[in-house]
Image (spheres, rainbow, N blue to C red):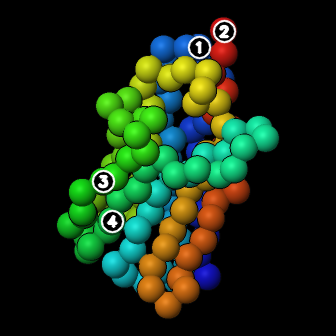
Amino acid sequence: QVQLVESGGGLVQPGGSLRLSCEASGSLNRPYVMGWYRQAPGKQREFVAQIVAIGTPNIGNPSYADSVKGRFAISKDLHRDAIYLQMDDLGPEDTAVYFCSFKSWGSNEGWGRGTQVTVSD
């Protein structure tokens, strides 16, 4: 079973920055993909960014949704099963609950409970 714990959400003004963290624990198959999704009120959950962990410390190239390219950066801790999402130049359209995801082979996958990000004056 996969457990994911997110942290780092909060309230920020437009143009500001936040850094989200997510740590995975439990029974983790490897290699795996960890990423971030978000869900705004009244909308479906959407992909934000992901990164592939081939093996510590090897990682694959990250991928991003077009809406966050150039503003968000996903990274992986070199020694732990943890990822980060650095979010810069935030706008009201980025307001959502952000969920961490884990996916590997053999139906080894999970979701975090989510962390709220609110961008407002």
Q: Amino acid at mark 1?
A: Gln
Q: Tell me the quarter of the image containing the C terminus.
A: top right
Determine which quarter of the picture holds residue 69. top left
Q: Amino acid at mark 4?
A: Val
Q: CA distance from mark 1 to mark 3?
A: 27 Å
Instruction: State the residue in front, 45 or 108.
Output: 45
Q: Pointer 3: residues within 10 angstroms few (<14), some, or many (20+)?
A: some
Q: What SS does tag 3 mark?
A: loop
> Which of the marked residues, 2 or 4, is nearer the chain's N terminus?
4
> Which of the marked residues, 3 or 4, is nearer the chain's N terminus?
4
Q: Amino acid at mark 3?
A: Pro
Q: What SS does tag 4 mark?
A: strand
Q: Which residue is mark 3?
A: 62
Q: Residue at x 77, y 38 (%)?
A: 41
Say left or right for 35 vs 120: left
Q: Which residue is mark 1?
A: 13
Q: Amino acid at mark 2?
A: Asp
Image position, residue 35 (x, y; %): 46, 57
Q: Which residue is mark 4?
A: 52
Is residue 10 in view?
no
> Which of the marked residues, 2 or 3, is nearer the chain's N terminus?
3
Q: Pointer 4: residues within 10 angstroms few (<14), some, or many (20+)?
A: many
Q: What SS does tag 2 mark?
A: loop
Image position, residue 74 (x, y; %): 37, 46
Q: Residue at x 53, y 83 (%)?
A: 108
Q: CA distance from mark 2 to mark 1?
A: 5 Å
Q: Are marks 2 and 1 in contact (CB under 8 Å)?
A: yes
Q: Which residue is mark 2?
A: 121
The answer to whether 57 is drawn above or below residue 16 in the figure is below
